[in-house]
Image (spheres, coloured by chain):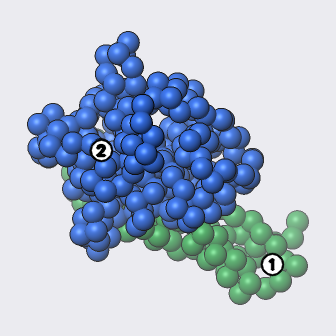
Chain colours: A green, B blue
């Protein structure tokens, strides 16, 4: 088994209204960043796991995203998986 | 009929629900979320609160509690299930109801009274309600904006599965009556068979004259009426 680290980004789907992102955009405008266009707020999740292969780790992380970490009604996810160097 | 009031870590409205059910003569038992059994003739109540601290998403973790397979089986067998506020969020995350409850459009926690206008007249929860008036009940949530895609909302509308909309005393439904930005002013929805109801407002907080409001009892009385129980 090898240890892997997954970086997972969960974002609202493009068509879903994101009032949090709008509020952050307004805050950035108020700070003087007047050229800021769209802002969207999401989540980042980091998971370490042991797996027999890189492919197996990716498959497991995809399952985690589909079954718990993202809600498919409103959210999309993407992730990268990398091997953790042995200490 | 007895009520099974499910308590998750972080549930806070179980006591209020038990009290409100007593007002209409329904006895309750508290069911800790680690239990696994629901009696066939019980009405399952998933009360409000912040189960598991609302971590990740509201209701996302509670749906894995040991009691949930029993709740699902109860629903599939035609038993009555009502999820209020956090309970509604849990039912959506568990897939017992479609859609999701998102952060309020205002980004503000809404703690106020709202008029609920019945939009369904066939389910046990709504059959004795008057669709031409609003029922006053408190809302108390930060994440109550009902969202589903266009096809799902159209399906709910076309099949009579919208249980309640935010509206006014006279039964009208207007955009300014919507406290959270829910699609089509939706405050509550039903499953396909009509035996599972999820709603954001709190009928259990409008249950006795001392509170100045008994409108919430209409839902429990409708359930009793549908079961042929006369008070």
Q: Which residue is mark 1?
A: A51
Q: Label 2: how many residues lie within 10 Å, few (<14), some (14-19) or many (20+)? A: some
Q: Nearer the viewer, mark 2 or mark 1?
A: 2
Residue A2 appears in which quarter of the rendering? bottom right
Q: Is residue B174 visible?
A: yes
Q: How many marks?
A: 2
- Name the side, left or right, on which B67 lies relative to B229: right
Q: Chain of mark 1?
A: A
Query: Which residue is identified by label 2?
Result: B128
User: Residue B74 at x, y = what percent?
Assistant: 60, 58
Tell me the residue at 36%/55% (across/down). Answer: B123
Quadrant of res B45: top right
Q: CA distance from mark 2 to mark 1?
A: 57 Å
Q: Secondary structure at mark 1?
A: strand
Which of the image's four quarters has the C terminus of chain B?
top left
- Residue B217 versus residue A64: which sits nearer the camera? B217
For numbered disc 2, what is the local secondary structure?
loop
The one nearer the camera, A50 or B188, is: B188
Answer above or below: position of A2 versus B101: below
- Please say if A58 is above or below B103: below
| Image quadrant assignment for residue B194 | bottom left
Residue A31 sits above or below residue A36 on the image: above
Q: Seen from this angle, which residue lies furthest top?
A: B210
Quadrant, the N terminus of chain B: top right
- Say which residue appears at 32% left-offset and 61% top-offset: B161
Is A57 displayed left or right of B2 in the figure? right
Residue A16 visible in the displayed image: no
> Where is residue B151 shown, x and y percent of the image?
29, 74
């Amino acid at each position: 088994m090898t240890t892997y680290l997954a970086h997972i980004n969960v974002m609202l789907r493009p068509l879903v209204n994101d009032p949090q992102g709008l509020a952050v955009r307004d805050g950035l405008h108020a700070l003087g960043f007047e050229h800021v266009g769209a802002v969207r707020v999401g989540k980042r999740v980091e998971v370490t796991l042991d797996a027999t292969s890189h492919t197996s780790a990716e498959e497991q992380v995809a399952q985690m995203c589909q079954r718990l970490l993202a809600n498919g009604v409103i959210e999309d996810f993407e992730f990268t998986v990398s091997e953790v160097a042995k200490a | 009929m007895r009520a099974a009031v499910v308590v998750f870590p972080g549930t806070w409205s179980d006591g209020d629900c038990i009290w409100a059910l007593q007002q209409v003569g329904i006895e309750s038992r508290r069911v800790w979320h680690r239990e696994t059994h629901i009696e066939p003739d019980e009405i399952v109540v998933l009360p409000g609160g912040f189960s598991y601290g609302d971590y990740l998403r509201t209701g996302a973790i509670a749906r894995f509690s040991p009691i949930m397979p029993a709740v699902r089986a109860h629903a599939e067998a035609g038993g009555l299930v009502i999820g209020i506020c956090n309970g509604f969020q849990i039912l959506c995350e568990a897939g017992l109801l479609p859609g999701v409850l998102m952060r309020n459009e205002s980004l503000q926690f809404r703690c106020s009274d709202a008029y609920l206008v019945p939009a369904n007249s066939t389910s046990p929860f709504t059959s004795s309600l008057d669709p031409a008036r609003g029922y006053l009940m408190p809302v108390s949530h930060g994440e109550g904006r009902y969202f589903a895609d266009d096809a799902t909302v159209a399906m709910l509308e076309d099949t009579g599965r919208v249980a309640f909309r935010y509206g006014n005393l006279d039964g009208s439904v207007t955009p300014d009556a919507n406290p959270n930005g829910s699609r089509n002013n939706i405050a509550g929805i039903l499953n396909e068979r009509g035996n599972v109801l999820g709603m954001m407002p709190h009928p259990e907080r409008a249950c006795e004259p001392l509170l100045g409001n008994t409108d919430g009892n209409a839902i429990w009385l409708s359930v009793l009426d549908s079961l042929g129980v006369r008070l």
